[in-house]
Amino acid sequence: MVSYKDLGLVNTREMFAKAVAGGYAIPAFNFNNMEQLQAIIQAAAETKSPVILQVSSGARKYANQTLLRYMAEGAVEYAKELGWEHPQICLHLDHGNSFELCKSCVDMGFSSVMIDASSLPYEENIALTKQVVDYAHKYDVTVEAELGVLAGVEDEVSAEESHYTRPEEVIDFATRSGCDSLAISIGTSHGAYKFKPEQCKRDPETGRLVPPPLAFDVLHEIEKKLPGFPIVLHGSSSVPQEYVDIINAHGGKLPDAVGIPEEQLREASKSAVCKINIDSDSRLAMTAAIRQVFDEKPGEFDPRKYLGPARDEMKKLYMHKIINVLGSDGKAE
Ligand SMILES: [Zn+2]
């Protein structure tokens, strides 16, 4: 048993309470490798933003859960070296799908876990979430649950059909499950292809897809039912078109990739939404930078010469999200 507190990590309780009260959101960035982690920590340290490092089941398979946990431990020390005296870094399991998996993360030093039982019938979702909460809270680990179904593909999580969270269920769910935060479905979606062209309009000038707006009415209903309760948005990449263009200009092929407009995420951040998950955007930043080097310098074969620029581009993206979209800069001085 390793306690996250001994690793210098924090859970989400205080972060979220401050974010809800302060009208901003905490960034939750997924990481799978060293360059991504460096970029996240550099951006958080420079802006003094609390940050959630997310490990998905895909990341656990790719990089190994133990290695990722030690990297997060190293990240705390790295943050201090960068001059961030009191780093507020949370290590979070993204989309845990069983009690055993959540327990193993609690036991090895994660400070927060998500149990995603949203595909199960309502009562089973509550029961499994409560089982995880009962265990995690013994160690002061916070638990995110999910109600409603998001469309799209994210590592092992995929759903054809989405349905919005039903506001009439949230009080019962949050009370009986005991979860600390709730991921809801209001039209965000996993991946870089969040909407099918037939769900969108097309801008006549640029030819780009314009996605349907998020269901703010559903969000406001939920806020009214659970005042001050931390709400989480998954699948909230914006798919910056400049990256899509760079990728496509250098041999890539991402036709009609489209995400959630940043103005809408900024608006959501001002409400009870206090955690916004961003993964695809950093994948796009990394891919754009690497493609550009490969295309422009075909003789280059030192990985540092293309992973370095990729890291710099991701850092730029993370800082932009923190400062201009979520408003979490300066909240972890
Ligand atoms: Zn997700």
Image (tube, grey):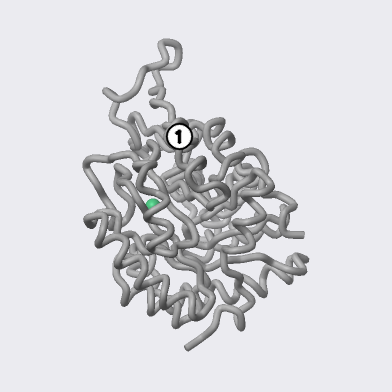
Q: Is residue 225 above or below residue 114?
A: above
Q: Is residue 157 above or below residue 272?
A: below
> Left or right of 162: which side holds 90?
right
Q: Position of residue 55 (x, y in %)?
A: 44, 64
| Depth order, front residue of 288/322 | 322
Place residue 52 in its image quadrant: bottom right
Which residue corresponds to mark 1?
A: 260
Figure disc tally:
1
Residue at x-position 55% and y-position 63% = 37
Kind of residue sitting beneath label 1: Ile
Mark 1 is surrounded, within 10 Å at the Cα level, by few (under 14), some (14 to 19) or many (20 or more) other residues, namely: many
The quarter of the rendered structure image containing the C terminus is: bottom right
Q: Position of residue 243 (x, y in %)?
A: 48, 37
Q: Position of residue 116 (x, y in %)?
A: 34, 59
> Left or right of 149: which side holds 64?
right
| Depth order, front residue of 162/235 | 162
Answer yes or no: is residue 291 visible: no
Residue at x-position 59% and y-position 52% = 26
| Depth order, front residue of 77/119 | 119
> Left or right of 211: which side holds 308?
right
Place residue 87 in its image quadrant: bottom right
Answer yes or no: is residue 198 visible: yes
* SS state under label 1: loop
Q: Position of residue 189 (x, y in %)?
A: 36, 41
Most distant residue in the top direction? 204
Q: Is residue 35 above or below residue 72?
A: above
Most distant residue in the bottom direction? 1
> Left or right of 173: which side holds 180?
right
Residue at x-position 49% and y-position 54% = 300
Residue at x-position 41% and y-position 11% = 204
